[in-house]
Image (cartoon, rainbow, N blue to C red):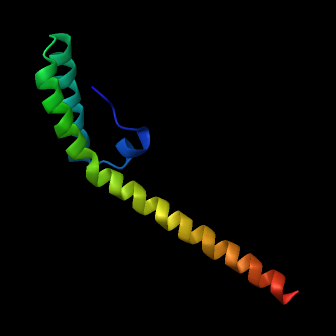
Amino acid sequence: MRHCSVQVRGLLTRDELDRYNALMEVGSYLESQSRYDLSYTVQKEVDLLIQPAIERLKDKSRARDRMTEEYLASLQADEDED
């Protein structure tokens, strides 16, 4: 089973995180039983479950980029005034 990144896990809601942990446990058990056909299906569910958190991470990144752009623009404005 492939885990998602720590950043993505940090943005999961409590319910999503509980479901994520349960699915990972089931998937790991299935892999230990060599039931890779079923663990593949569980991995697909995990992938769907984490999509909203990935979007939240992208939104945070876009907001940070906007703030950086505004800061650099303000520095440029200050230099132009000098």
Q: Residue furthest front?
A: 37
Residue 77 in the image: above or below residue 57 = below
Q: Nearer the viewer, residue 35 or 59?
A: 35
Q: Is residue 32 above or below residue 21?
A: above
Which residue occupies the extreme bottom position in the image? 81
Picture layout, residue 70 above or below residue 5? below
Question: How many discs appear?
Answer: 0
User: In which quadrant is the C terminus drawn?
Assistant: bottom right
Residue at point 20%, 16% (across, down): 31
Residue 49 on image: x %, y %: 21, 45
Above or below residue 73? Residue 51 is: above
| Residue 20, image quadrant | top left
Is residue 7 shown left or right of residue 51? Answer: right
**Who is closer to the viewer here, 37 or 33?**
37
* Residue 27 vs residue 13, the one in the foreground: 27
Q: Is residue 81 left or right of residue 11?
A: right
Residue 18 location, x and y as percent? Answer: 21, 38
> Quarter holding the N terminus?
top left
Residue at horizontal 19 percent and vertical 24 percent from the top? 27
Residue drawn at x 31%, y 29% is: 2
Kindly give the residue lying farthest to the top in the view shown. Answer: 33
Residue at the (22%, 20%) spot, across then down: 28
Residue 71 at x, y = what percent? 66, 73
Residue 19 visible, this angle: no
Whether residue 43 is visible to the viewer of this picture, yes or no, is yes
